[in-house]
Image: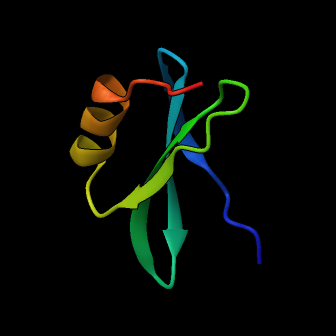
Amino acid sequence: MNPRFRNVRRIGPVQVASFLARGRNRHLAACTAPRCDFSAEYDSRTAAELAARTHRCKA
């Protein structure tokens, strides 16, 4: 089953979204820049937003 992303927000080139996985809220930060492979899941929304703010693309 594909996760349904909600509360999607863009911080620079990174999108932060929340979704439900195995009955728990999870948060994802993923860079949308070409050739940048950054993406990570976090337990808290704050951690995902911090990762988005501090991310620097290598591409």
Q: Quadrant of the C terminus?
A: top right
User: Please, which residue is most extreme toward the top here?
Assistant: 12
Instruction: Identify the residue at image location x=53%, y=43%.
Output: 38
Instruction: Identify the residue at image location x=73%, y=26%.
Output: 34
x and y percentages locating residue 25 in the rendered image: 40, 66
**Along the viewing direction, whichever of 42 and 34 lies nearer the viewer:** 34
User: Please, which residue is most extreme toward the bottom here?
Assistant: 22
**Along the viewing direction, whichever of 35 and 13 lies nearer the viewer:** 35
Q: Is residue 27 left or right of residue 8?
A: left
Q: Is residue 27 left or right of residue 22?
A: left
Q: How many marks?
A: 0
Compared with residue 26, is residue 24 higher up or lower down, i.e. above or below? below
x and y percentages locating residue 7 in the rendered image: 50, 38
User: Please, which residue is most extreme toward the right here?
Assistant: 1
x and y percentages locating residue 12 in the rendered image: 48, 14
x and y percentages locating residue 37 in the rendered image: 61, 44
**Along the viewing direction, whichever of 29 and 57 lies nearer the viewer:** 57
Instruction: Identify the residue at image location x=77%, y=78%.
Output: 1
Q: Is residue 10 left or right of residue 41?
A: right
Instruction: Identify the residue at image location x=52%, y=68%.
Output: 20
Query: Is the image coloured rainbow, by chain, by secondary structure, or in one colour?
Result: rainbow
The quarter holding residue 11 reads top left
Compared with residue 41, is residue 29 higher up or lower down, i.e. above or below? above
